[in-house]
């Protein structure tokens, strides 16, 4: 097993003009604070993108290469999630478009859609991602915040996605809000590499043909991405060896370290995927 690499959580936040104001800053702040105080604080890092447009989402996915993606904002049932356009107004992105995007990023282990009526989008994304959380109906601002904080507090304590989801739902109950059944988890059996608890392990079941096919497709995507990143790392190291300027060398060294970290993460995912295929055929 490779040295553990911190899991990156990409927070995508949008509250377009003309929509109900949400306390999204508090949600992100409380999640970040909880992870900083957690037992596994070094196992996660958070990247934030605010007032996101569809183009910003694609760019963030390419730049950050996240393992967990969290969207906070508005959803409009089958019409899509509400991102922003160039003027800051609503730009809806459909479930099919989101599914197509996440189908390109094999390293993503979990997607959280903390937005009203986002189950349709969760269903579509679930075809490509091991675990997706959406909302079956409208959810109040306070309930959404309580769920998110409880969910990430559990991950920060080393618990599984399923446990974290249940704790998030219970956090809504503990706050005295009758919306604990609104979040819904859709989970594939492929194992997630969020730090596990010894008392909260996944019990393997035989794979169905569809599940096996998804794992094999993910295997091919991971191998292709790993090959590309090894080639990029080779080029970076060659450039670093020839560069004399201090400022440029610093940038190249940082890029090299980032690429090495990404490769280590991909190798861990590839190993986990191979184990899932080997153990549960």
Image (spheres, grey):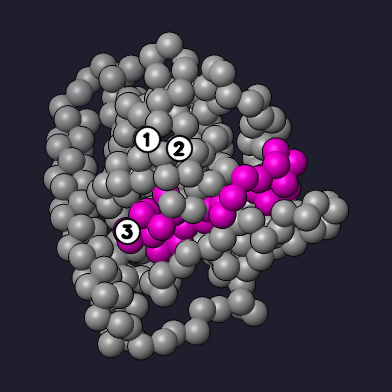
For residue 168, above or below residue 206: above
User: Which residue has dot 3 on it?
Assistant: 128
Can residue 53 be seen at all in this image of the molecule?
Answer: yes
User: Which residue has dot 1 on it?
Assistant: 93
Percent position of residue 169, x then y: 69, 59
Disc 1 + disc 2, Cβ < 8 Å: yes
Magenta part of the chain: 121-148
The reply, left or right, for residue 131 in relation to residue 58 is right
How far is disc 2 from disc 3 in space, using C-alphas?
18 Å
How far is disc 1 from disc 2 in space, using C-alphas?
5 Å
Mark earlier in primary sequence (1, 2): 2
Residue 136 drawn in magenta: yes
Which numbered mark, 1 or 3, is in the foreground of this view?
1
User: Which residue has dot 2 on it?
Assistant: 81
Quadrant position of residue 206? bottom left
Of helix, strand and loop, which one carries label 1?
Answer: strand
Which numbered mark, 2 or 3, is in the foreground of this view?
2
The reply, left or right, for residue 152 in relation to residue 104 is right
Percent position of residue 150, x then y: 70, 54
The residue lying at 54 percent from left, 17 percent from top is 17
């Amino acid at each position: 097993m490779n040295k553990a690499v911190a899991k990156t959580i990409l927070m995508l936040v949008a509250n377009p003009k003309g929509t109900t104001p949400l306390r999204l800053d508090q949600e992100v702040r409380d999640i970040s604070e909880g992870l900083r105080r957690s037992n596994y604080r070094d196992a996660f890092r958070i990247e934030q993108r605010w007032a996101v447009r569809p183009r910003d989402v694609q760019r963030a996915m390419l730049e950050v290469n996240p393992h967990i993606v969290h969207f906070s904002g508005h959803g409009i049932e089958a019409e899509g999630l509400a991102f922003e356009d160039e003027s800051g107004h609503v730009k809806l992105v459909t479930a099919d478009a989101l599914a197509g995007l996440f189908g390109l990023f094999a390293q993503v282990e979990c997607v959280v859609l903390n937005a009203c009526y986002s189950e349709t989008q969760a269903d579509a994304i679930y075809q490509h991602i091991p675990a997706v959380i959406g909302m079956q109906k409208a959810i109040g601002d306070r309930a959404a915040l309580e769920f998110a904080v409880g969910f990430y507090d559990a991950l920060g304590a080393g618990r599984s996605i399923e446990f974290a989801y249940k704790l998030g739902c219970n956090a809504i109950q503990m706050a005295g809000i009758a919306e604990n059944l609104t979040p819904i988890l859709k989970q594939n059996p492929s194992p997630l590499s969020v730090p596990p608890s010894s008392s909260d392990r996944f019990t393997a079941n035989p794979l169905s043909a569809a599940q096996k096919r998804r794992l094999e497709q993910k295997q091919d995507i991971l191998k292709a991405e790993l090959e590309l990143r090894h080639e990029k790392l080779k080029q970076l190291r060659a450039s670093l060896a020839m560069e004399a300027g201090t400022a440029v060398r610093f940038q190249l060294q940082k890029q090299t370290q980032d690429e090495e970290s990404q490769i280590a993460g991909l190798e861990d995912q590839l190993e986990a995927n191979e184990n899932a295929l080997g153990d549960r055929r």
